[in-house]
Amino acid sequence: MKYSPIKILIVSCSLFLMGVVAVATASDQTPNLGQKTLVINSGYSAEALTCIECHSKKMPGTVATWKHSGMARAGVSCFDCHAVEKSSPMAVQCEGLKGTSTYISPMVSSKTCSRCHPKEVEQFLKSGHATLASKAVMDVSKVGGGLIKLQYHYEGMGFIDNPDMKLDGLTPKDMPAYNRASRASGCQMCHGTQVEMGPDNKPINETWPGGVGTRYPDGSVGTCTVCHTRHQFSIAEARKPEACASCHLGPDHPDIEIYLSSKHGQQFLTHGEEWNWDSAPDTWEPGDYTAPTCAVCHMSGIGELSTTHNINERLKWDLMHKKSVIRSGERGDGEKGDMLMRKVCINCHGSTHTATQRTVLDNSVALYNKYWEGAVKMKKELADKGLLKKDAWRDGFQELMYYLWHHTGRRARQGSAMNGPDYAHWHGFFQVFQVYQDMEEIHKWRIKNNKIEDLSTVMSTGPL
Ligand code: HEC
Ligand code: HEC
Ligand code: HEC
Ligand code: HEC
Ligand code: HEC
Ligand code: HEC
Ligand code: HEC
Ligand code: HEC
């Protein structure tokens, strides 16, 4: 499929563009980060040139990086991405533009990219990386505004200076700025949030910059540069596992750790430098690499599959929430996802190997779900007898239940899905069973004594 006429057309088109504009930047082919002046021969409008010329002095790092990009060679410059209408809610004038009629914004959303890359943006907007990602940290509807409460009240220490903090109508301006610090430095940098604007069209309350699902003041959604970072916008970068690792890591979703400790990761670590990372879009195939990276399994064109920016497309199970179910609705189409993921594996593995791995995953999901259902049953009994604390974060049983699904249970499921035995087992099911048995002990004790133990037995210490 990949050598269809349409794809060849796209490939040769970009080569053509590169050839034409190579003239524009030919004199800068040898990058020189210390360079003070930039000679531009042709190819940019006069307006675009003023941005580049001044910024090469005032922001040399940005211009130098942009010069390495395919888009610089294709004549796409600062002006194309940053200039906005005066009427835009994000319109400002930088120091160099005061007194002119040109307005710009430091914020650039997927909407800007969609002018030239409509297909990628359309796919991206259907994925969990868009609205769902920012919804995850903004949703007040979740159990009593649980996530907002976690971020501002608990992590932001609102429980000390405002113990009765009411969530209704709460806005960041009602709280001390430090209440926002944990959210702004953590959740928001991976997930993104709604950018709030001050009267001078500048972002306020540390709501920008942000992560993949950032919601912009003009209603557009998504930061494309989380994987091919600004201002190089490299396709090779996005194909490497490091492009996902700044977010997909840690105790609750250790995807990079799972990958690097898998057989695929072993090949990447030992042979990755020999791989060809620069093939044209949609022509990157086995042979260019010997084992898959995150992008190969979740995004890149391979065999009969085309590249997709909808990372939900090739997934069967939801492995991140409390109970794992087959994906449907806004989470994707699990039955179809199953079929597509198998089509990835069979480029390098036989049908026996592939079928076994998929069964292992299905069984791991079933096993984890059994634990989860048992925990739900215990919790209900305790709730019915009034044996749960209202504050879940001071209640050993409820803390353990959180670790059961959010940390150990995710590691078991994702370790199994992505072939990382250490995460499936030692960081996964081994700890799942321990956490579960500790919950059983607390459950038994509370039922027998008809009261809640004085201190949390968990004390939130463990890297559970
Ligand atoms: C292909 C589009 C594109 C081009 C071309 C481009 N930028 Fe950007 N720029 C972005 C994106 C995307 C962001 C991140 C915006 C966000 O997170 O909302 C950004 C962010 C920025 C920021 C704000 C972030 C910071 O670090 O302060 C500055 C300043 C900036 N770009 C300057 C430039 C300059 C100067 C040029 C020309 C040499 C340029 N950009 C060319 C897309 C572009
Ligand atoms: C005469 C010099 C000069 C010119 C011309 C100029 N800039 Fe700037 N620009 C600056 C300086 C200095 C800054 C840093 C101070 C600031 O943020 O205002 C800046 C900041 C920026 C920022 C970041 C603004 C922010 O709020 O963080 C962006 C984006 C930007 N310029 C884009 C452009 C674009 C696009 C053009 C061309 C239409 C342009 N600039 C023309 C000097 C210039
Ligand atoms: C004015 C049109 C235009 C806009 C706006 C634009 N692009 Fe591009 N982009 C291009 C062209 C043309 C190419 C092909 C360049 C080449 O052949 O290397 C390209 C190539 C790319 C590539 C592939 C580079 C490679 O290594 O092959 C990426 C990734 C990319 N753009 C991302 C973005 C993102 C992200 C944005 C928004 C922040 C954006 N583009 C905005 C025109 C644009
Ligand atoms: C290091 C980056 C990172 C940080 C920091 C982070 N998350 Fe996440 N979050 C992720 C990733 C990646 C996923 C996808 C998890 C998966 O597939 O298992 C996720 C998943 C979630 C989900 C489930 C998805 C959904 O739509 O229901 C929620 C809710 C969530 N995070 C909320 C938060 C909150 C609240 C914070 C801060 C208290 C936070 N996250 C901090 C990266 C992060
Ligand atoms: C989750 C990481 C990720 C995000 C977010 C992302 N990209 Fe990509 N992008 C990739 C990968 C990986 C490839 C290379 C696919 C391949 O192997 O051919 C790619 C390739 C591209 C290409 C080259 C043409 C193609 O489709 O293969 C363009 C253009 C592009 N991306 C634009 C965008 C735009 C615009 C956005 C924002 C909507 C965006 N990307 C967001 C990972 C990402
Ligand atoms: C800037 C942070 C960030 C980067 C970089 C990133 N992701 Fe994500 N990813 C997230 C967040 C946050 C979520 C959770 C979205 C949600 O709420 O459903 C997520 C979710 C996912 C999901 C599950 C889809 C779902 O239902 O939400 C997959 C698969 C995924 N990412 C793959 C990738 C791959 C592959 C890469 C690299 C090519 C990557 N991501 C790069 C932040 C990121
Ligand atoms: C060998 C192929 C392969 C590689 C390589 C791979 N994954 Fe996966 N990934 C999978 C499979 C299979 C699933 C489970 C899909 C399903 O449910 O059918 C999955 C699931 C996921 C999920 C969804 C978890 C959820 O909550 O539902 C995320 C997020 C994810 N992978 C991210 C990554 C990241 C980041 C990397 C690289 C560090 C990576 N993957 C490498 C095959 C792969
Ligand atoms: C680009 C080729 C390629 C793709 C695509 C690929 N793999 Fe692999 N896989 C390999 C290589 C190479 C090894 C290492 C074989 C060895 O250990 O000798 C491997 C090893 C494995 C192993 C370790 C067991 C063993 O055979 O050594 C598992 C499990 C695995 N792959 C599962 C998958 C699954 C599931 C998929 C699809 C979601 C997949 N692979 C996709 C190349 C690939």
Image: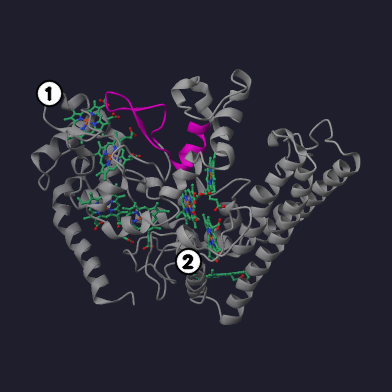
Q: Position of residue 265 (x, y in %)?
A: 56, 60
Task: Give the percent coordinates (x, y) of residue 295.
Answer: 45, 60
**Residue placed most toward the observer, 26 or 458:** 458
- Element marked by disc 1: loop
Q: Quadrant of residue 352 in the image?
A: bottom right
Q: Residues within 10 Å of mark 2 (few under 14, many from 20)?
A: some
Q: Is residue 434 left or right of residue 312?
A: right
Q: Quadrant of the N terminus?
A: bottom left
Could you give the CA–CA distance between mark 1 and mark 2, rounded to whole angstroms? 53 Å
Q: Which residue is mark 2?
A: 333
Q: Quadrant of the C terminus?
A: top right
Ligand 2 is in which quadrant of the figure? top left
**Dot 1 crowding, Cα within 10 Å, few <14, some 14–19, many 20+:** few
Q: Earlier in the sequence, mark 1 or mark 2?
A: 1
What amino acid does circle 2 point to?
A: Asp
Judge whether 284 appears above or below 374 on screen: below
Residue 139's tag is none
Kind of residue indicated by mark 1: Gly
Q: Residue at x 19, y 37 (%)?
A: 52
Q: Which marked residue is nearer to the observer: mark 1 or mark 2?
A: 2
Does the numbered disc 1 mark a residue whose Cβ is under 8 Å from ligand 2? no
| Residue 43 percent location from the top left of the image | 11, 48
Asked if residue 429 shows in the view, the reply is: no
Residue receiving disc 1: 99
Which quadrant would residue 277 be assigned to in this image?
Answer: bottom left
Q: Which residues are magenta?
A: 183-209
Whether residues under marks 1 and 2 lie with C-beta atoms below 8 angstroms apart, the answer is no
Q: Toward the viewer: 22 or 14?
A: 14
Q: Is residue 70 magenta?
A: no
Q: Is residue 447 above or below residue 322?
A: above
Where is residue 446 shown, x and y percent of the image?
85, 41
